[in-house]
Image (cartoon, helix red, strand yellow):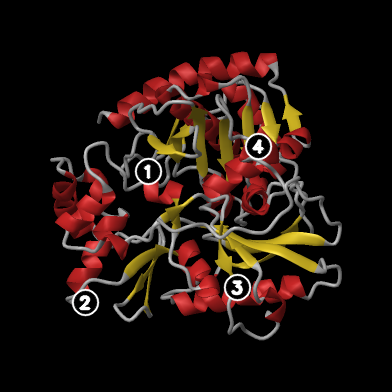
Amino acid sequence: MLTPLRIDAPSELPRSDPDAAVLAIDLGSARLKGAWVRSDGRLGPVLSVDSPVRVPRQTPEGVWQAVNGLMAALLHQADAPATVQALALTGLTRSHVFLDPEGQEDVRLVLWDDPYGEACAAQVAAAYGVPETRSFGAFHPLARLVQWRHDHAHAPRAMLELKDWLNYRLTGVLATDTVVYGRLWSDTVTVAQVLERLGMAASSIPAPQAAETILGRVQAPLGKGLERLLNVPVAVSSFDTWCATLGMGAIHEGGVYDISGTSEAMGAFYAQPRHPPGAVCLQWTHTLWHVGGPCQTGLGTLAWFARRFLETDDPAATLAAARQSTASEPPLCLPYVSGERMPWWDADLSASFHGVRGHHTRADFARAVVEGLALAHRAALDETGLRTAGGVIHMGGGGSRLPDWCQTRADAFAMPFLVDENAESALTGAALAASVALGYHPTLSCAQNAVRQRSRRVVPDPARVCYFEERLTMFSQLLHQALHT
């Protein structure tokens, strides 16, 4: 395992410098965002551009240039801090760059939704010593690794998550974070043993480091406008969900979270590993296990309704239409327009409306979609037993900016929500991890304290809780029928 770079620091925690901050970058599937973040988690203005991964046939070099451009723009802001404490990158996961035997990146960038490796499921499952192949095909990192070898007639030097490849370009150090690496872990066989059975070197997957450590320092050469970054520490960091849970203050025993974006990611934290059907269990920190996963439904479903029926693709338009509904019993919606992941993992699950009557209006259907999403996510947490982990739900992501969305979810979940003040939880979390590595906070837990204090509390309306409990019974019956037909 690599030895983390140690940053010289006094025996006492360093004081925050008002003219110093972490430069944080979040490479998402839709947007590329960046901001300066203070050691207490406060963000400066967020710069946002279209994500480079939206470009058809995008290459790793194209992503690198886009990230360089955003970093240069942040460095040249009129009020940019004088000192760059560290760089902290996060972003979409299960997106990979391959290095050839000479260490040069392949032009192919394999993104999160690419079924690359599907044909290698049986081979990877056999290497793990299990008969079931469903979870070892498309999107599994080792299936992609084997597929690349088949395509090129030789093994790559390494396969890196996109975030880790960007860190490699900055520092020259090959590594990943412990949470991403944990996806490959098994109770019966080590990752090195699995790679050996696949005929791969152990170094094909970079060695893991904790997200809250420093990987290395920025090395030359750098692009124009990035000279200030030379020799700046670079945090290992982790993928966007991990960073977002840290940035919203959710990482504690019994913590439950809801990251509301194009799709939802939900989960809870426990002192011991748990394996409820349909949820993913990963070690999140040295002492806590994460149980949960991504849903296919979310703000993207609201955008779908707006696009098809409201002549816009703004999720807020669907919420605005829903507010106009006056029906005492609107239609009930199963909102699975693109199937569902956690906890059903059924790509064929489809959307439907029930109880439709002649008097129902477009506003009533918009309301049905909004309520159907809240019920779908409540059902997912109930199915996995995660809702009972804590007394509140930490909420972040773009949906946390939409008051109607937050209130509807609090009512449907029958739980208070603690809403992140800035909605850019991933940027905040990436920077907080770097601040821990630099010594500004003794632990990740301490780093979250200031963030929690700034959260807004949304309390469920008792009358609406009763309404949703009745609707949940009908929703669950319809969902059960859909899953078994």
Residue 162, given in percent of the width and then of the height, sits at 46, 64
Could you tell me the amino acid type at mark 3?
A: Val
Question: Would residue 152 be found to the left or right of residue 247 on screen?
Answer: left
Question: Would residue 265 be found to the left or right of residue 111 on screen?
Answer: right
Q: In this rendering, does residue 196 appear at all?
A: yes
Secondary structure of residue under mark 4: loop
Q: Are marks 4 and 1 in contact (CB under 8 Å)?
A: no
Dot 2 or dot 1: first in sequence order is: 2
For the C terminus, the image quarter is top left
Q: Which residue is mark 3?
A: 218
Secondary structure of residue under mark 1: loop
> How far, Cα to Cα, is label 1 from label 3?
42 Å
Picture residue at 44% right of the left edge, 74% below the top: 56
Picture residue at 67% right of the left edge, 86% below the top: 224
Viewer-closest of 257 and 302: 257
Label 3 packing within 10 angstroms: few (<14), some (14-19), many (20+): many
Dot 4 or dot 1: first in sequence order is: 4
Dot 2 or dot 3: first in sequence order is: 2
Viewer-closest of 256 and 264: 256
Residue 352, above or below 302: above
> How far, Cα to Cα, is label 2 from label 4?
44 Å
Q: Which residue is mark 1?
A: 339
Q: Which residue is mark 2?
A: 152
Could you tell me the amino acid type at mark 1?
A: Gly
Q: Name the front one of labels 2 and 1.
A: 2
Q: Name the front one of labels 2 and 3.
A: 3
Dot 4 or dot 3: first in sequence order is: 3
